Amino acid sequence: MGPLLLELIAAGAFISGGLSLLYLPGTGFGDNFEAVQIARALAAGDGYANPYGGYPTGPTAHLPPLFPLLLAGLFWLFGPTPEAGAVASSLCVAAHLLHTVLLVPIAALLVRSRRAGAWAALLAVVTPPLLVLPQWEAIYAGAGLMLFCLASHRWTAARGLCAGVAARCGAFAGALALLNAITPLVTGLWLLWLSERIAVSVAVKAKFLTLTAAFAGVTVAPWIVRNWLVLGAPVPLRSNFGLELALSNNEWAGPSQLGNWRRPEVARLHPTLSAEAREEMRREGEIAYNRRKLAEALEWIGQNKVAFLKLTGARLVQFWWPVDEMSGFHIFTVRLVTVLGLAGMIVMIVRREPAAWFLIGASLLFSLPYYLIHVTTRLRFPIMWVSLLGGGYFLEWAARRLVRLYRAGAL
């Protein structure tokens, strides 16, 4: 694939990413986005705090720290102004471009076909399944996971499974965890798959993986210590699982996040949308509040097992086959990528592509936590590149078959 095609893909990704901002009424830097509120508190010198509508609920670990820190840097430079939102949107469009361009080398690495990557990038540009959401880390996490796979492969190919490579991989994986709390499921599986394909002893592989995990832990440790000192509990990455589980599993909840926000009975339970819930959190403290919510959710699940299983099944379906989103066109594009990605995975299995099982495993592992809470397509964005890669692989395979049939006179 020549440089001209790569440049065309990049230009298309830039245009596609910019146009996708039209899905939102502006940059979306409003009171309902926790990362933005934390960033405002950081820029104002109030620390990592107050994620809910700017209300003084106190110190938080609602989100991992890296993305709010990025936004805080913009607010520090520009203030809470439209200019800060414009720069954040521009950075997110750039991340969208990077995400699209990286599909070419990741396809070359995993399925040995840059053409499949070009088809995947074309699919990402034409549909596109990824919305540019400057108030969330999702696209950054997706691009980061692809970079992690490419970089760790390059390091291990050059230096093997040595301690220095383990340090690099661990630091990179830890940084991704501080960006998105679910990424360790993918980075861990990738390192297992990668080390398995290197011809060294089991002891060397085990040492490498142990060292990598240790270096990842060292990278995350300052955040854990901060949470222990400030919040009174060693929160590993984020603290809001109890809240989300309670919001998603109750007598009024449905599988869709947007659908739940429309239900007053559910909306009143979330501190972002309810002054009463914010006051409860401020009074109890974030850790105690989330522990109480976790207990309430587990009690409801225990008493309503059938309803919980139905909700879980519906969330599983809607994670891969969205129903309730902000745009019917977006629903269509995500469904299209899902179908093409699944078709590509089937072709990979039939053709015995070694990476097929990693790609399938990464998608399934990443999705598992989200079957427990209400879903929206944004939650899938960090792993959408797998479906795009599968779709590109299928389109390349189908195009080759059509060309052969045409040349054979069958078409």
Image (tube, grey):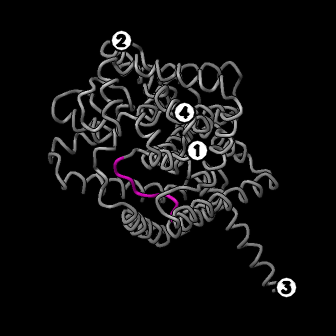
Sequence-wise, which precedes: disc 3 or disc 1? Answer: 1
Of tags 1 and 4, the one toward the viewer is 1
Q: For residue 304, what is the image quadrant?
A: top right
Of tags 3 and 1, the one toward the viewer is 1
Local packing at callout 3 (Cα closer than 10 Å; few below 14, some 14-19, many 20+) is few
Magenta stretch secondary structure, dominant: loop
What number of labels is visible? 4
Rounded to the nearest angstrom, the CA distance separating label 1 from label 4 is 47 Å
Sequence-wise, which precedes: disc 3 or disc 2? Answer: 2
Residue occupying image coordinates x 40% and y 35%: 270
Sequence-wise, which precedes: disc 1 or disc 4? Answer: 4
Q: Which residues are magenta?
A: 128-135
Q: Which mark is residue 232?
A: 2
Local packing at callout 4 (Cα closer than 10 Å; few below 14, some 14-19, many 20+) is few
Would you say residue 338 sits in the magenta stretch? no
Residue occupying image coordinates x 48% and y 59%: 100
Q: Which mark is residue 255?
A: 1
Say whether residue 67 is visible.
no
Q: Which mark is residue 406?
A: none
In the picture provided, is 66 more to the left or to the right than 54?
A: right
Residue occupying image coordinates x 36% and y 12%: 232
Q: Which mark is residue 159?
A: 4
Judged from the image, the secondary structure of the residue bearing numbered disc 2 is loop
* Along the viewing direction, whichever of 122 and 74 lies nearer the viewer: 74
Q: State yes or no: discs 3 and 1 in contact (Cβ < 8 Å).
A: no
Residue 296, percent from left and from top:
53, 22
Residue 108, percent from left and from top:
61, 55
Q: Which residue is mark 3?
A: 410
Judged from the image, the secondary structure of the residue bearing numbered disc 1 is loop
Position above or below: 268 against 225: below
